Image (cartoon, rainbow, N blue to C red):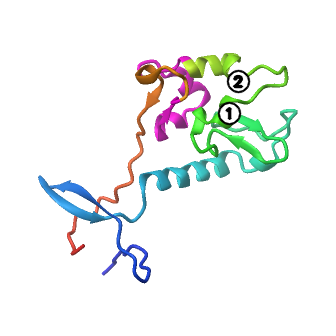
Amino acid sequence: MNQVFPPTYAGGIYATETRRIDGEAVPCVLLNSVQSEANGLEEALQDAFLPDWRELRENGDAPMCDLPVIAVKVKGHEWVTSLTAPHRIHDAILRDSIDENETPFRDTGVGQAIVKARVHDATAFYKHCPTALLFGTWDSTAGEGLNSAKIPRAVVSEPGILRRAKV
């Protein structure tokens, strides 16, 4: 019999969430969050498609990647990509970066396309940062309120186990 248990700590309590199973609200123990699963998938993609991403060269002589990512070199630090930045393609690190001509990212061709992209016209995300369509993204600092780019995540992480046990 295979069983899965969440981590147990002295004095700790299980994190639970309510799920609808067979039309009934059932408390379920949370083994891992969707956000944590997404971060793990992003790390796996980063390592699979850009195995040497920590050593990317500023002159572009880097291994080719089959997966488009936006990358910026932060002085004194490693490269930051749309897979490693906390807020993905809309992270301040990428948003506030400048290119070799001192052009702010949002004023570049790619940056303008990303800024204009929306859920009903997501070609720029597909072309420059397709993982945004998988893991979701929100341009919360664009100053456009409800009209800003907000792509819901397509990834879910429910294990699909419907056997009930006491919580």
The residue at 42%/39% (across/down) is: 153
Asked whether residue 25 is in view, the answer is yes
Q: Secondary structure at mark 1?
A: helix
Q: Is residue 29 above or below residue 38?
A: below
Residue closest to the eye, 130 or 99:
99
**How far apart in space, not on screen, are marks 1 and 2 (Cα)?**
7 Å
Which labelled disc corresponds to residue 94? 1
Q: Quadrant of the C terminus?
A: bottom left
- What amino acid is found at the position of numbered circle 2 in the picture? Phe
Residue density around tag 2, few if under 14, some if 14–19, many if 20 or more, within 10 Å: some
Q: Is residue 119 magenta?
A: yes
Q: Secondary structure at mark 2?
A: helix
- Residue 5 lies left or right of residue 53; in this view the side is left
Q: Quadrant of the N terminus?
A: bottom left
- Residue 65 lies left or right of residue 83; in this view the side is right
Q: Which residues are magenta?
A: 116-140
